[in-house]
Amino acid sequence: MHEEVFPGVYRIFDSFVNVYLVDRGDHLVAVDTGIETTCGKILDAVGEIGKPLKAIILTHGHLDHTGSLKCLRERTEAVIAAHRDEVEGIAEKTGIEPDVKLQDGEVFEGFKVLHKPGHTRGSICLLDEGTKSLFVGDLVVERNGRLEEVPQQYSLDPEMNRKRIAELLEVDFENLLPAHGEPLLGNGKEKVEELVKRLGL
């Protein structure tokens, strides 16, 4: 139930949301955990890949990203990380307090943390500089080959979220891996530029 997006990066799709597993040599890192039903799919993928899941990074605290957190806490020894502004909300919603409180600019498990508040206070993107891949959480979504802003009713501050989208033009990346929709390989930044122009930012 998983596909290799490109070498070392695997996508697990469940209903309407993506979880990514990233190979870090002797272990795997998960970006988000999906909904409650995603846990079994993640564990199956981890078993098939054949490396332990050692870390989970949450792009933000909404339940379609933290739905399998409790299950994975019980079934793995993975360290859980989230931005420090998101930790309290995650603990309230899931009963699980992240072990690692991330800050903007730091590197964790090979990802540079980019704090992009707007959708939520502690939303982050994760940049894998080695592969020029940006895991964007819900900052943008992919639909029919192009990017859109997440529907405004789901964002804490939609105007701030738009500013964060424009800031992606300052980031050096090629591949864009969203939580909703298809990954964009090789042309991710071009698609962000198109969105910024459409939004008049």
Image: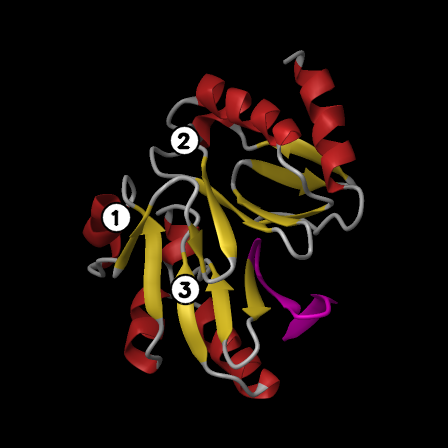
Query: What residue appears at the point 37 percent right and 57 percent down from the top-left corner?
Result: 66
Magenta stretch encompasses residue 114: no
Q: Residues within 10 Å of mark 1 (few under 14, many from 20)?
A: many
Measuring from the top left, give residue 183's x and y in whole percent. Answer: 70, 51
The residue under label 2 is which amino acid type? Answer: Pro
Q: Residues within 10 Å of mark 3 (few under 14, many from 20)?
A: many
Residue that carries the numbered disc 2 in the rendered image: 117
The answer for how far apart the CA atoms under marks 2 and 1 are is 14 Å
**Residue 133 in the figure: left or right of residue 29:** right
Measuring from the top left, give residue 42's x and y in whole percent. Answer: 50, 74
Residue that carries the numbered disc 1 in the rendered image: 87
Q: Which residues are magenta?
A: 1-18
Check whether the beta carbons of the residues at disc 2 and disc 3 lie within 8 A of each other: no
Q: Main secondary structure of the magenta part?
A: strand
Q: Secondary structure at mark 1?
A: helix
Q: Secondary structure at mark 3?
A: strand
Query: What residue appears at the point 45 percent right and 52 percent down from the top-left corner?
Result: 107
Residue that carries the numbered disc 3 in the rendered image: 56
The residue under label 3 is which amino acid type? Answer: Ile
Q: Is residue 197 visible?
A: yes
